[in-house]
Image (cartoon, rainbow, N blue to C red):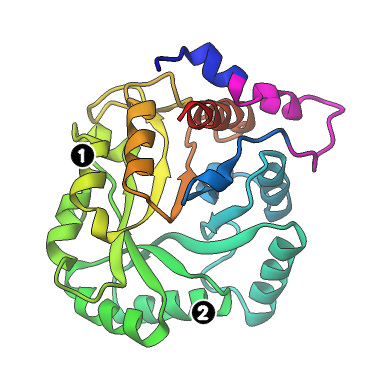
């Protein structure tokens, strides 16, 4: 069934946008599509809210009706004290939001690998969305085994000399411990002119996390835009996610409008929920 963008938004209860209007409760949750029929969850990559406080980030996440988040260091510093980590985790729990992961975390030496895993352990994270240097992969694998925390290597597209694509990471980890995997960023994948859907299928056995977004062009010049307004075939991608029975988190990472991301993020979440309501 072919459905228009407007119908997608209507099906999603795109009153999501209304939650950004003055007078609407900061903690009011919008109507959401029934996610229980899917094996995956929707989440937020907190880089989206990089200019906002922890409290505002949790509030906006809850307003979206989303209950999973992965923190960038803006919201939980990598050198945070045990007390700060504990209080931050408590704030997430009080808000009804699961802090499932952290990242993107760069690891340029063994000390940074050690710190990343200790940080994740203390914050009760199940996954590190990370970028270890190639020569640290074996050491990182040892930490994955020791801590029981998964690593999902994040691709950054054009200009990324370490992991421009999911393929570039996959070929290095495919024979490593099963806890060594991928976070496919579909926007950066498209910007390197690869098909996010095909990469999902080809490397699915190692896909632990995904960042969902849309971009304006399948080239280095492509930039983040509201989902449904760009060049990625989101309905086809979501059909593939469902067909593969992906069971991780599909995390929105809306990089546009850093000082006021909520309206565009609302539109993006509404669009995705609208698509899912038709599948």
Please name the residue that numbered disc 1 is placed on: 198
| Res. 197 image quadrant | top left
141 displayed left or right of 39: left
Q: Is residue 75 magenta?
A: no
Q: Position of residue 8 (x, y in %)?
A: 53, 20
Q: Residue furthest bottom?
A: 146
Residue in the picture at 60% in, 39% down: 34
Mark 1 or 2, nearer chain start: 2
Label 1, secondary structure: give it.
helix
Q: Quadrant of residue 19?
A: top right
| Pointer 1 local density, CA inside 10 Å: few below 14, some 14–19, many at least 20 | few
The tag on residue 121 is 2
Contact, mark 1 vs mark 2 (Cβ under 8 Å): no
State the residue in front, 207 or 275. 275
Q: Please indicate, yes or no, whether residue 50 appears anywhere in the rendered image.
A: no
Viewer-side label of 1, 2: 1
- Spot occupied by residue 241 in the image (x, y as percentages of width and height): 36, 42
Q: Tell me which residue sits at (70%, 23%) in the image.
A: 15
Query: Which of 106/189 is in front?
Result: 189
Left or right side of 159 for 73: right
Q: Identify the residue at image location x=48%, y=70%.
A: 126
In what element is the residue under mark 2? helix
Quadrant for the N terminus, please.
Answer: top left
Horizontal side of residue 101 vs 22, given as left or right: left
Question: Which residue: 42% across, 40% down?
Answer: 212
Region in magenta: 11-29
């Amino acid at each position: 069934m072919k459905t228009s963008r407007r119908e997608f938004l209507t099906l999603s209860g795109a009153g999501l946008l209304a939650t950004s209007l003055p007078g609407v409760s900061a903690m009011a949750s919008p109507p959401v599509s029934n996610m229980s029929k899917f094996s995956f969850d929707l989440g937020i990559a907190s880089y989206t809210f990089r200019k906002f406080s922890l409290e505002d980030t949790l509030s906006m996440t809850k307003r979206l009706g989303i209950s999973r988040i992965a923190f960038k260091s803006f919201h939980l510093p990598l050198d945070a004290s045990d007390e700060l980590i504990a209080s931050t985790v408590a704030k997430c729990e009080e808000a009804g939001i699961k802090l499932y992961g952290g990242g993107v975390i760069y690891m340029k030496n063994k000390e940074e690998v050690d710190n990343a895993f200790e940080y994740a352990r203390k914050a009760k994270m199940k996954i590190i969305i990370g970028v270890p240097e190639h020569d640290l992969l074996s050491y990182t694998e040892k930490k994955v085994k020791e801590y029981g925390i998964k690593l999902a290597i994040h691709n950054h597209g054009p200009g990324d000399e370490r992991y421009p694509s999911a393929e570039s990471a996959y070929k290095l980890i495919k024979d490593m411990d099963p806890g060594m995997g991928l976070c496919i960023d579909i926007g950066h994948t498209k910007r390197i002119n690869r098909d996010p859907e095909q990469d999902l299928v080809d490397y699915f056995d190692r896909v632990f996390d995904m960042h969902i977004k849309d971009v304006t062009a399948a080239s280095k010049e492509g930039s983040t835009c509201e989902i449904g307004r760009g060049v990625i075939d989101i309905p086809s991608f979501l059909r593939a996610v469902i067909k593969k029975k992906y069971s991780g988190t599909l995390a929105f990472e809306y990089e546009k409008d850093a000082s006021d991301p909520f309206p565009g993020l609302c539109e993006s979440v509404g669009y995705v929920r609208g698509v899912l309501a038709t599948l």
